[in-house]
Amino acid sequence: MQTDYIGHDRAYQKRRNDPNYEGWSSGYAEDWLRSWQPMIQTTAFPKQGKLLELGCGAGNLSIRFVQAGYEVVGVDIAPNAIAWAIENAAKAEVKATFLEADVLDLAEIADSSFDIALDGRCFHCIIGSDRRRFLENIARILKPNGILAINTMCNEVPKSTYWLDNFDPRSRQIIHDGIATRYIGDSNDILQEIMQVGFRVIDVEIVPPKDAEDLADLRAIAIKLS
């Protein structure tokens, strides 16, 4: 299936000039309280350490983690996202590092150099065999017993016109003009993907949809086995 990951850059370019957007979307304060703060508060999540956010976008989540006491590096393939993230960090007066990098390669990141890898809702944008590459690179950059924290869309899709027109139930991909843009997998299948590359899942929660047009999120914490 054809992909267009760098296409996110065009979207960030438009959003950066639109006051209705804080980053890829808006409502990050609410999302922090609903999705990320509960994850930090679990016993499985480290209370400090060096954290890499994958697909950091405009840095909204990375900035929150700096404010929560973590040393943060954010990576994204989109140059406009990284420029925006640097600008947002300066406005928030926080110290974070943002790098233009491909999450399927992470050549800029040394082996065993991070305590925590955070999927800031990037994993559902990764398609097909690229998903294993994504996870293998996370395993490479994590220290022994490092933590992978995943928050990704999963399970049933809404029965609205958009989904009927664009979602392929066989591949479980959203497809626009022949380009796959999202993978909405079964939560159990996603957990299997994580375990197959050398992680043990130690905490799982399915966050239900907010409304009829929303999707559930799989929130999982996994530890690197070696």
Image: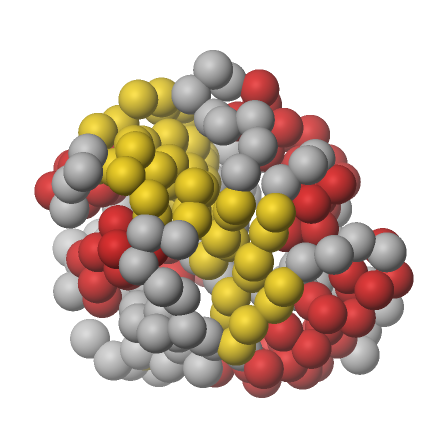
Residue at point 74% right, 56% down? 95
Lateral position of residue 33 relative to residue 178, left or right:
right
Lateral position of residue 19 relative to residue 84, left or right:
right
Q: Relative to 24, does residue 218 appear above or below in the rendering?
A: above
Whether residue 192 can be seen here = yes
Residue 48 location in percent, x, y? 57, 32
Total label count? 0
Residue 72 location in percent, x, y? 60, 51
Residue at point 33% right, 44% down? 143
Nearer the observer, 158 or 133: 133
Residue 74 location in percent, x, y? 56, 60
Residue 183 occupies which quadrant of the picture? bottom left
Residue at point 46% right, 46% down? 118
Extreme left residue here?
Answer: 196
Lateral position of residue 28 relative to residue 211, left or right:
right
Q: Relative to 106, does residue 143 appear above or below in the rendering?
A: above
Residue 215 location in percent, x, y? 46, 40
Whether residue 131 can be seen here = no
Lateral position of residue 186 relative to residue 94, left or right:
left
Q: Which quadrant of the rendered structure holds the N terminus?
A: bottom left
Nearer the observer, 7 or 32: 32
Residue at point 53% right, 38% down? 49
